[in-house]
Image (cartoon, rainbow, N blue to C red):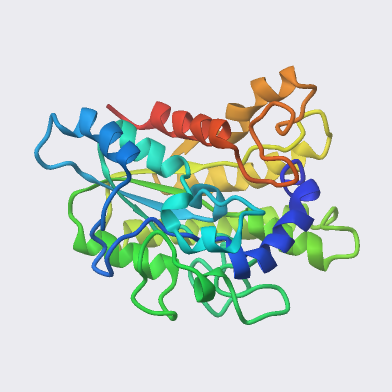
Amino acid sequence: MSGLVRRGVRSLVAVGVLLTSAACSPAATSSAGEPAGESAGESAAAGSTASESSSPGGYLALGDSVPFGYRAGEPADTYRDPTAFVGYPQLVADHLGLDLLNASCPGETTASFSDVTAQSNGCENSPGSDSGFRTAFPLHVDYASAEQSQLDYAVSALQQNEDVQLVTLQIGANDGFLCQANTPDQCSSEVDSVATTVQTNVDAILSTLRGKGGYDGTIVVVTYYALDYSDSQASETQQLNDGITRAAKDNDALVADGFAAFQPGAEKAGGSSTAAGLVRPNDVHPTEQGQQLLADAVIAVVPD
C-alpha cells in the first residue's frame, strides 16, 4: 500500500483539501445519465470502432481520482471543466467503442462510496471539513442529489441501462491515505487491518452491483501501482491489492493488474514510477502514459 500510499499521503491529503478546490472535473453527461457530448479525440477514436455497430454498448466506470483522471496543481478554472480530465476509462471506452458513464470521484474511500456521510479523502468531505470535491466542482456525470452515493448512482445506472457491457472499479487507496494521516506510525502497523476493511467493503460494493444492480456482465477491478518499486514498502501496496483481488474473485469479477502494468517501466528507471514518466512529478496520479498502461491492462482482460 505504501508504495503508493506512504509517499503519496501528503499529496492526497492535500488532494483531500485540493479536491475541495480542484479535483473532480467531470466529463459532461445529463442527469439522466446520457452523454452530453464528446471531445473531437473521443469522437474520432470511438467512431473507428463503434461505426461497426449502430448501437454501441455502455460502460460504467467507478472509483476514485485515478479513473477520474485527476491531476494536482492545475489552475482552479480547470477543475470546472470535467472534459479537461481524461482517465483510463475514456481510453478504454474509445478503444472498445462503448458509451462511457464515468461516475468516479476524487478522494472516494470504500466507505464513502456506499455512504456519503462516511469519511472520504476529498470527495463528499475532507479531513477536518464537511466540504469535498463534489460540493465545489462537477463530476463526469450528474448525480441525482448530494445525498446519492456513488454506489446508489451505479445501481440506478445499471437498472436503467440494460446495454451496459462493462463495469470497472478502482477504489481503496484513499482508505490507506486516511489511515496514514491519522495514525502515529503512518499506518505501518495497521496495513493488514486497512486491507481487510477494503476487501470487506469492495466485496459489499461488488455484491450490490451484482444483486441489487442486477448486473451479470463483465466487471473489471483495477489494482494500484506503486510509486517506487525499489522501496520495500511497495509490498504494502500489494497487501492492499491482494484484498481487492480476493473481493473481485469472490464476485466473479476480473482483475486488471495496475501494479504489474507500471513495474517494468519503473524498474528501468531505478524503481521510480515518476522517473519512468508514469506518475506526475510531485503527485501520485498517473501521467497520460500511465493512464494508457492502466487502460491497456483493462483491455487485456476484457473478453472478446
Q: Residue at x 20, y 44 (%)?
A: 57
Out of 190 and 146, give the one closest to the viewer: 146
Does residue 59 appear to the left or right of 223 in the view shown? left
Query: Residue 124: percent from the left, percent from the top?
Result: 55, 73
Residue 200, quarter of picture: bottom right
Quarter of the picture holding the C terminus: top left
Out of 106 and 203, give the one closest to the viewer: 106
Q: Is residue 221 above or below residue 131?
A: above
**Residue farthest toward the left in the current orientation of the protein:** 54
Query: Residue 19: percent from the left, percent from the top?
Result: 61, 65
Does residue 282 appear to the left or right of 147 in the view shown? right
Does residue 43 appear to the left or right of 189 in the view shown? left
Query: Residue 204: percent from the left, percent from the top?
Result: 47, 61
Q: Residue at x 81, y 40 (%)?
A: 233
Does residue 122 appear to the left or right of 176 in the view shown? left
Query: Residue 59: percent from the left, percent from the top?
Result: 30, 47
Q: Residue at x 46, y 51 (%)?
A: 84
Confirm whether residue 263 shows in the render.
yes
**Residue farthest toward the right in the current orientation of the protein:** 184
Q: Residue at x 59, y 76 (%)?
A: 118
Out of 226 and 273, give the one closest to the viewer: 273
- Marks counted in the figure total 0
Confirm whether residue 109 shows in the render.
no
